[in-house]
């Protein structure tokens, strides 16, 4: 019997038992759908993270004391902090830089009258706004006099502004950070939540000198953010900065760095590998439901073979070879599984489009995983259909013909 | 594979055919050294009480079962030397079956049921349809081609089964109690149809029955008892 005839026969049998067939397929549908959803949303999340991080600037290096990389927090307490002079040295002796922004920050209390909010206090120079891509919503950044003298002026993030001032314009108004009174000179445009879920707008930015003198009470610089000129290799700049810092911090050859320079690529890689692992784990769980779906198919096929014992006997009597009977039931199982696979793919893609919109990641169509899911469901059909088909083919025609 | 035997020539020859079921103490000799020759175009009825070996003999003739000992020649082929698949090919090309329980496929039209053996002969859909329609017309059911077995009476179902058995122009029609599930009027109808095919198309018929009325339609009646042929009339 040619394969096409067998396929038509299988299709007819499946459609004839529509309810049973669809229930049987359900396991495969869910399994394949889940795999598609996991992989599609997983890669969407990876792309989103990558995009978000590159929005911060793919040409940015973070220089921090302590050993890295330990995620965005890092271990820095144990190492000697940087000073403003370190940032100046980088600016003066490393080529190909667009801006160097020394920063320091701490948690603090912003107070206006009875309203108050725990927020992040960042001490910066104006370069910070450039390298981090902050735009003004209102007012101005700091002027040179304020930076040099360490004046008590601040620029507010949207969250702090709304919390303290509501809809009133804060420009020129006074407020307190801890016990110190600050004058608001500008407000920042919203950046929203960061990739890591932090509210980036929950910040008060003040001049670095003001921060050191009045808040921290030291001359430490916690972070030096370096922005590289377009077209300049971040790797080369990184090497230069490392050499310079080792020299300045008097680290002998062979000794480990007590600081680290990280570029965005590293951070992206860390997060990408995290999402990849999550995707793989979830897909494995989804894969298990595919196997369960396969067992469902085997069960249904077993019942079907028993029910159709007389039919099998008749087919054998009128001249069907055993392989032809085997093929008939195997094809039926494969068609069931493949139908389920196709349904699962469609359902998975549909759910992925909705899900991507819902959690705000781009919808990434991966033809590879769709093809893989389809072939895998077919393979499940073969693997779990073989035993029932074998059972059908091994029936004794004489007994099968008399089966009631 | 098989040379056409002219009417009246020997088509089937069983020599010393023995069928033993079971092992050791529990062995049952269903057939105990049968010799039987059936000529082309003959209509033979096999009779006998249940357990006498007539059904076993039919199964062996139909290549569904193989003898434990002895030889079975079909035309010029020694069937006992054939593999399972070769016997399947022999069945599909030269044998037709009808059964007491009709054994039609449920929820499948009469036409498709009749087409079934032709599928295994790898015939094209159009050719199959044409032959199946003709076979249905031969049994007087051309108008019922689209009906499923459940929509047909018992007599009609058996006629569909006859059409299915004969659609491929087999040499031999093997009938296992074809009237067992039918009332006497329908039985008569079916038997007259078989006689007609036997006379008009020269198809050899081997029928198992325990009704003497039905056996009377045959040229020869073979009586089985305890695994041997008791008498041939």
Image (tube, coloured by chain):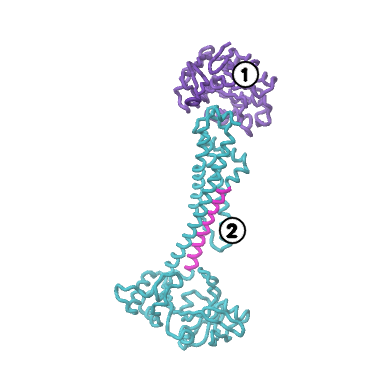
Chain colours: A cyan, B purple
Instruction: Give the prevailing secondary structure in the magenta stretch.
Output: helix
* Stretch in magenta: A26-54
Q: Residue at x 62, y 79 (%)?
A: A166
Q: Is residue B157 magenta?
A: no
Residue shown at the point (50%, 42%) measured from the top left:
A382
Q: Which numbered dot is residue A354?
A: 2
What SS does tag 2 mark?
Answer: helix
User: Mark 2 or 1, which is nearer the eye?
Assistant: 1
The disc at residue B210 is 1
Q: Dot 1 lies on which element?
A: loop
B92 up-or-down from B75: above or below: below
Q: Position of residue A31 (x, y in %)?
A: 54, 51
Tag 2, which chain?
A
> Residue A248: percent from the left, percent from the top?
34, 79
Mark 2, residues whose alpha carbon is within 10 Å: few (<14), some, or many (≥20)?
few
| A255 relative to A140, above or below | above
Q: Is residue A31 magenta?
A: yes
Q: Can residue B90 be seen in the rendering of this structure? A: no
Q: CA distance from mark 2 to mark 1?
A: 70 Å
In the picture, the disc for residue B233 is none
Q: Nearer the viewer, residue B233 or A79?
A: B233
Q: Which x, y percent locates residue B225? A: 56, 16
Give whichever of B233, B202 is nearer the camera: B233
């Amino acid at each position: 019997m040619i394969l096409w005839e067998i396929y038509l026969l299988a299709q007819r049998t499946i459609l004839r038992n529509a309810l049973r067939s669809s229930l049987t397929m359900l396991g495969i549908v869910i399994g394949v759908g889940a795999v598609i959803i996991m992989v599609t949303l997983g890669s969407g999340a990876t792309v989103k993270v990558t995009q978000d991080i590159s929005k911060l600037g793919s040409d940015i290096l973070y220089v921090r004391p302590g050993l890295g990389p330990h995620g965005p927090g890092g271990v820095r307490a144990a190492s000697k902090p940087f000073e403003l002079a370190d940032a100046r040295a980088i600016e003066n002796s490393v080529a190909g830089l667009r801006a160097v922004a020394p920063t320091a920050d701490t948690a603090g209390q912003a107070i206006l009258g009875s309203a108050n909010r725990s927020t992040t206090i960042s001490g910066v120079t104006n370069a910070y706004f450039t390298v981090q891509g902050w735009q003004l919503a209102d007012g101005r950044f700091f002027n040179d006099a304020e930076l040099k003298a360490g004046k008590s002026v601040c620029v507010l993030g949207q969250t702090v502004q709304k919390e303290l001032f509501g809809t009133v314009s804060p420009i020129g108004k006074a407020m307190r950070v801890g016990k110190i009174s600050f004058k608001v000179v500008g407000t920042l445009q919203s950046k929203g939540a960061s990739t890591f879920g932090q509210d980036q707008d929950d910040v008060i930015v003040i001049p670095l000198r003001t921060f050191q003198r009045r808040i921290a009470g030291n001359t430490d610089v916690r972070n030096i953010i370096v922005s590289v000129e377009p077209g300049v290799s971040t790797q080369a700049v990184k090497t230069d900065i490392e050499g310079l810092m080792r020299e300045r911090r008097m680290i002998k050859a062979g000794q480990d760095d007590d600081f680290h320079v990280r570029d965005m690529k590293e951070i992206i890689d860390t997060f990408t590998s995290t999402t990849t692992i999550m995707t793989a784990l979830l897909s494995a769980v989804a894969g298990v439901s595919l196997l369960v779906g396969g067992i469902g198919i085997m069960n249904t096929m077993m019942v079907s073979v028993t029910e159709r014992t007389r039919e099998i006997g008749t087919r054998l009597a009128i001249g069907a070879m055993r392989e032809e009977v085997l093929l008939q039931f195997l094809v039926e199982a494969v068609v069931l599984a493949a139908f389920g696979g196709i349904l699962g793919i469609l359902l998975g893609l549909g759910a992925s489009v909705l899900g991507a919109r819902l959690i705000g990641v781009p919808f990434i169509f991966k033809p590879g995983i769709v093809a893989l899911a389809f072939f895998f469901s077919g393979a499940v059909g073969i693997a779990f259909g073989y035993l029932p088909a074998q059972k059908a083919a091994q029936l004794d025609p004489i007994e099968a013909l008399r089966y009631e | 594979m098989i040379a056409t035997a002219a009417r009246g020539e020997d088509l089937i020859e069983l020599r010393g055919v023995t069928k033993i079921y079971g092992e050791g103490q529990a062995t049952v000799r269903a057939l105990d050294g049968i010799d039987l020759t059936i000529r082309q175009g003959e209509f033979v009825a096999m009779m006998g009480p249940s357990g006498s070996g007539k059904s076993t003999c039919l199964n062996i003739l139909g290549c569904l079962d193989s003898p434990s000992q002895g030889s079975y020649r079909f035309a010029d082929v020694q069937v006992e030397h054939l593999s399972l698949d070769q016997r399947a090919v022999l069945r599909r090309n030269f044998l037709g079956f009808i059964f007491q329980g009709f054994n039609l496929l449920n929820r499948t039209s009469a036409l498709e049921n009749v087409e079934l053996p032709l599928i295994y002969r790898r015939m094209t859909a159009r050719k199959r349809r044409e032959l199946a329609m003709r076979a249905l017309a031969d049994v007087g059911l051309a108008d019922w081609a689209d009906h499923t077995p459940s929509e047909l009476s018992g007599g009609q179902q058996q006629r569909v089964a006859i059409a299915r058995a004969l659609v491929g122009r087999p040499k031999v029609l093997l009938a296992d109690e074809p009237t067992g599930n039918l009332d006497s009027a329908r039985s008569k109808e079916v038997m007259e149809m078989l006689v007609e095919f036997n006379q008009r198309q020269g198809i050899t018929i081997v029928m198992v029955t325990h009704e003497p009325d039905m056996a009377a339609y045959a040229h020869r009646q073979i009586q089985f008892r305890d695994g041997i042929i008791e008498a041939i009339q």
